[in-house]
Amino acid sequence: MSKRASIAVHDEGSAIVEFIFASTVLLIPMIYLILAAGQLQAGSYAVVGAADQAAKVFAVADTPAQARSNAHQVVERSMNNFGLSGASTQITCDLECLSPGSIVTIQVSLRVQLPFVSDYFDASVFTVDAASTQRIDRFG
């Protein structure tokens, strides 16, 4: 048996081991990155929808107290629809709230949790927020 033939015999099967090792090392972080990006996107969609709907609900309420309550409920429901929680809501009015012609701005912020890690640690790396503005009807 020649020296070249004995080297070839010892190399059999190592390509499969290298492929499995390399694909595992590269594939697991890639999958995690995709999951984290999906979580971030879900949080972004949730805050945009929540802010938009809360501003609309606020503008059609009868009293400022009812408007604030309704806006907070809409934000909470919107977050629940996306399976998220812990959003903060900030409501500002340029004049007296619900006075004809006034403008209400609702800002919703959410700390996006990292998948799997946030179950054990408080690991929110991203904060997403959205604001929506609604003018109160002058002829309501």
Image (cartoon, grey):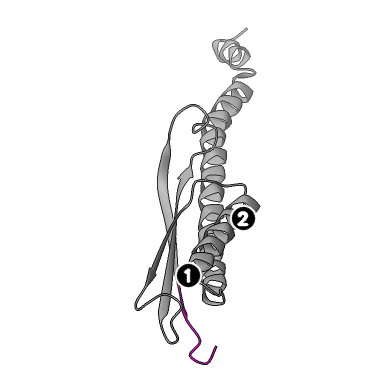
Tell me which amino acid carries mark 1: Pro
Asked if residue 123 lies in the magenta stretch, the reply is no
What crowding class fits label 2: few (fewer than 14 Cα within 10 Å), some (14-19), or many (20 or more)? some
Name the element at disc 2.
helix
Query: Which residue is rendered at x = 57% and y = 71% of the image?
Result: 57
Q: Is residue 130 above or below residue 112?
A: below
Q: Quadrant of the C terminus?
A: bottom right
Query: Which residue is rendered at x = 45% and y = 29% of the image?
Result: 121
Task: Point out the stretch of residues depicted in magenta.
Answer: 133-140
When asked about the image quadrant of residue 9, the answer is: top right
Q: Is residue 59 above or below residue 89?
A: below
Q: Quadrant of the N terminus?
A: top right
Tell me which amino acid carries mark 2: Arg
Which of the two labelled residues, at mark 1 and mark 2, occupies the earlier sequence position? 1
Q: Is residue 136 above or below residue 14?
A: below
Pick out the residue farthest to the top.
1
Residue 28 on image: x %, y %: 55, 33
Query: Which residue is rendered at x = 62% and y = 55% of the image?
Result: 77
Name the residue beneath numbered marker 1: 64
Distance CA(mark 1)–CA(mark 2) = 20 Å
Residue 89 on image: x %, y %: 44, 57
Residue 93 on image: x %, y %: 38, 73
Query: Which residue is rendered at x = 41% and y = 79% of the image?
Result: 103
Q: Which mark is residue 77?
A: 2
Left or right of 33, for residue 91: left
Q: Is residue 92 above or below residue 19?
A: below
Residue 54 on image: x %, y %: 54, 67
Name the element at disc 1.
helix
